Amino acid sequence: MSNLYSKVHRLKSQGWTWNHFLQQIDLIYAGGIDEKTLLALYRQPHRKASAHVNKVITTLHDNVFASPFPEDTQALLAIYNRLIHSKNNANVADDISDFIIFLNGDLQHGSTLRQARLHWIKADIHLDQLSNLRINGKKLALLSQQKLALYHYQQSYELLQELNSDQQNDRYIDDFTLYKVQQNMLACYLNSSHPQQRYQDNALHNYLLHSNYIKDSKRALHSEPYQWIIARNGLRFSSIQKNADNCDYFYRALISANSAFTDYNYAPLGAPAIINSEDFKWAIQQLTP
């Protein structure tokens, strides 16, 4: 969850008063943050925050909504993220290869939840390679990495669903987490195709038709209706599928997340206005009287 609007809403949805919210912030940073800033982040998806405010809110959110995954797997993910963002590491490719060897050996051990997270991390590694392979015209390698990423995301998704169906399991995997796995699988198709060719891609359309992406999007929005990014993505891909009922559903969800989205020209932080994207053109035609 990258946007502060959703993080602030998620924290406020715990039944916190604004005073309690500010007190929790003070526990992280003694200087706190300005109440007007907090309220603006709650009300406006386009609101940009300083690096300091971003860090404070993110820290508080991650403390309250701790990852459901084992701590050692989260540490592995953190190591991988530092590895790929290291600017002065000339051996990053070799390090990633060694990292994959470790994951392959460790993948079958531990709890179902642990295995699900390791599959997810391995899928992330393959996903991260797709754009460069596409740009460099390495089609066979691209298809191989895409296949591996999809396989490991699917394994992770099935294991997480298995946990939720186990009545003896005391760890429920939330709807937003399941949605994120589906979103990452969708990214495997998007990152493998040139932007101008994505929506004529039969594999992408087949995924949208046969996957749980739309279903999981709706479930996540039912749990957390302020997640405007989920609603916006749902509207985008429903438009691409030319599904009028789903376009109506996700547009209603989008304006429920924030009424500013009634204006097709509204641009939230991190995304262009839907009026400026070809992906939403069909949906707008259906939604406009």
Image (spheres, helix red, strand yellow):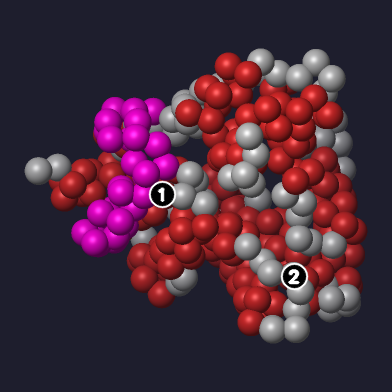
Residue 220 magenta-highlighted = no
Mark 1 is surrounded, within 10 Å at the Cα level, by few (under 14), some (14 to 19) or many (20 or more) other residues, namely many
Q: Can you identify the residue that label 1 sits on? A: 231
Q: Name the residue: 79% across, 43% down.
A: 63
x and y, in percent, of residue 96 in the image: 82, 53
Q: Is residue 12 left or right of residue 220?
A: right
Q: Which residue is mark 2?
A: 171
Of the residues shown, which amino acid type is indicated by label 2? Arg
Give the residue at x 63% y 67%: 153
Taking the magenta stretch, the answer to whether it contains residue 254 is: yes
- What's drawn in magenta, residue-wise? 238-267
Residue 36 location (% of width, % of height): 58, 16
* Picture layout, residue 165 above or below residue 240: below
Task: Give x and y (percent) for residue 47.
Answer: 51, 23
- Of the numbered discs 1 and 2, the one sitting upstream in the chain is 2
Label 2 residue SS: loop
Q: Is residue 39 left or right of residue 202?
A: right
What is the three-letter code of the residue carrying label 1? Ala
Helix, strand or loop at disc 1?
A: helix
Q: Is residue 135 above or below residue 174?
A: above
Residue 286's place in the image compared with 2, above or below, is: below
Is residue 117 in view from this perspective? Answer: yes
Residue located at (65% from left, 39% from top): 16
Point 46% across, 55% down: residue? 221
